[in-house]
Image (cartoon, rainbow, N blue to C red):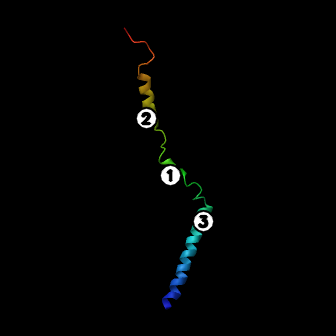
């Protein structure tokens, strides 16, 4: 029974700290954009080296509209 006199206030203190941290996180904007990070992993930014290589490969390709050589 004497342990409850210590455990109940300790539990209430832990709950109060958790509630304070939760409201601090909400006020500081931690929960503003929940979907952005989830989608950003799926849609990567374009790699400049890759786009340059693709452009170079496309510029070296023969033109399909040119008449065939006889």
State the separation of the CA atoms marked 2 and 3.
42 Å
Which quadrant would residue 52 be assigned to in this image? top left
Residue sitting at 44 percent across and 23 percent down? 59
Mark 1 or 2, closer to the camera: 1
Residue 70, horizontal then vertical, whole percent = 37, 8
Upstream in the sequence, badge 1 or badge 3? 3
- In the image, taking residue 24 as reference, residue 2 lies left or right, namely left
Contact, mark 1 vs mark 2 (Cβ under 8 Å): no
* Residue ranking furthest to the top: 70
Q: Which residue is mark 1?
A: 38
Upstream in the sequence, badge 1 or badge 2? 1
Which quadrant would residue 67 be assigned to in this image? top left
Residue sitting at 46 percent across and 33 percent down? 51
Q: Which residue is mark 2?
A: 50
Contact, mark 2 vs mark 3 (Cβ under 8 Å): no
* Residue ranking furthest to the right: 27
């Amino acid at each position: 029974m004497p342990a409850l006199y210590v455990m109940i206030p300790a539990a209430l203190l832990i709950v109060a700290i958790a509630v304070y941290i939760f409201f601090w996180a909400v006020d500081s904007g931690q929960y503003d954009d929940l979907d952005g990070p989830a989608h950003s992993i799926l849609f990567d930014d374009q790699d400049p080296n890759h786009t340059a290589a693709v452009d170079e490969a496309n510029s070296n390709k023969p033109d399909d509209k040119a008449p065939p050589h006889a």
